Image (spheres, helix red, strand yellow):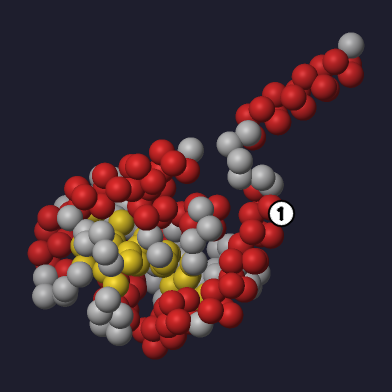
């Protein structure tokens, strides 16, 4: 499975025209434009744009890295318009909508998620450093940072510092890695592609036990 992901990741990187020699910072926001979702969770309509601006500003401190914004597949925003209006003028900043999220995560050196993105768990399963960017007036839906498997940021300065810790502090990076493995084992057990086999064996054992 992981080999297939890496093959797809290489293809996606080539399609998006990312620089294969630069590490990717993947930002996974929630919806930029979806009123039904907007009014249920945001306290103002431009919250995800504020998060994006914070990420873009933080990226200025890491000129050797490149930013990829993965727009939600059900977001009603037009990706080309988004690139022109929001990313124009920023070097090494890209956006994509129709691409496999798992392969993009696997190709990335760091994943930054919005408070409401469920892809945070995918990043942990794929053993990627994770930063949760919470600029909303709500508690974290899943306490990744509280469990020590992610760093939390609520503004640009905190985000820049968290990114610096991931990329430059070996002790922080190592500690996050150890905690990720334990967290995934506790919540998802073994990530070895054999979950179906284990479930089938359990069902078989239960059925045989009944008989």
Residue drawn where x is 82% and y is 22% of the image: 205
Q: Quadrant of residue 168?
A: bottom left
Could you say where residue 1 lies in the image, as x and y percent from the top left? Answer: 48, 38
Q: Nearer the viewer, residue 97 or 61?
A: 61
Could you say where residue 145 lies in the image, as x and y percent from the top left? Answer: 58, 72
Q: Nearer the viewer, residue 9 or 132?
A: 9
Q: How many marks?
A: 1
Q: Is residue 135 above or below residue 122?
A: below
Residue drawn where x is 16% and y is 61% of the image: 82
Could you say where residue 114 lies in the image, as x and y percent from the top left? Answer: 42, 66
Q: Is residue 169 left or right of residue 6?
A: right
Quarter of the image that includes the C terminus: top right
Residue to which mark 1 is pinned: 186
Q: Is residue 109 above or below residue 172?
A: above
Q: Is residue 46 above or below residue 120?
A: below
Residue drawn where x is 26% and y is 44% of the image: 11
């Amino acid at each position: 499975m992981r080999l297939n992901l890496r093959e797809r990741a290489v293809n996606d990187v080539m399609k998006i025209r990312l620089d294969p020699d630069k590490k990717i910072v993947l930002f996974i926001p929630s919806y930029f434009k979806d009123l039904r979702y907007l009014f249920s969770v945001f306290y103002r309509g431009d919250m995800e744009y504020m998060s994006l601006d914070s990420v873009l500003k933080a990226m200025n401190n890491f000129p050797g890295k490149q930013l990829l914004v993965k727009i939600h597949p059900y977001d009603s925003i037009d990706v080309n318009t988004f690139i022109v209006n929001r990313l124009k003028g920023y070097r090494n900043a890209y956006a994509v909508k129709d691409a496999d999220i798992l392969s993009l995560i696997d190709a990335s050196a760091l994943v930054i998620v919005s408070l409401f993105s469920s892809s945070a768990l995918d990043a942990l399963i794929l053993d990627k450093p994770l930063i949760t960017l919470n600029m909303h007036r709500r508690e974290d839906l899943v306490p990744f940072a509280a469990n020590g498997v992610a760093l939390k940021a609520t503004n640009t300065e905190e985000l820049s510092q968290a990114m610096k810790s991931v990329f430059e502090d070996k002790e922080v990076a190592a500690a996050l890695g150890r905690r990720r493995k334990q967290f995934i084992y506790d919540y998802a057990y073994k990530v070895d592609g054999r979950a179906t086999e284990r479930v089938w064996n359990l069902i078989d054992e239960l059925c045989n036990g009944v008989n």
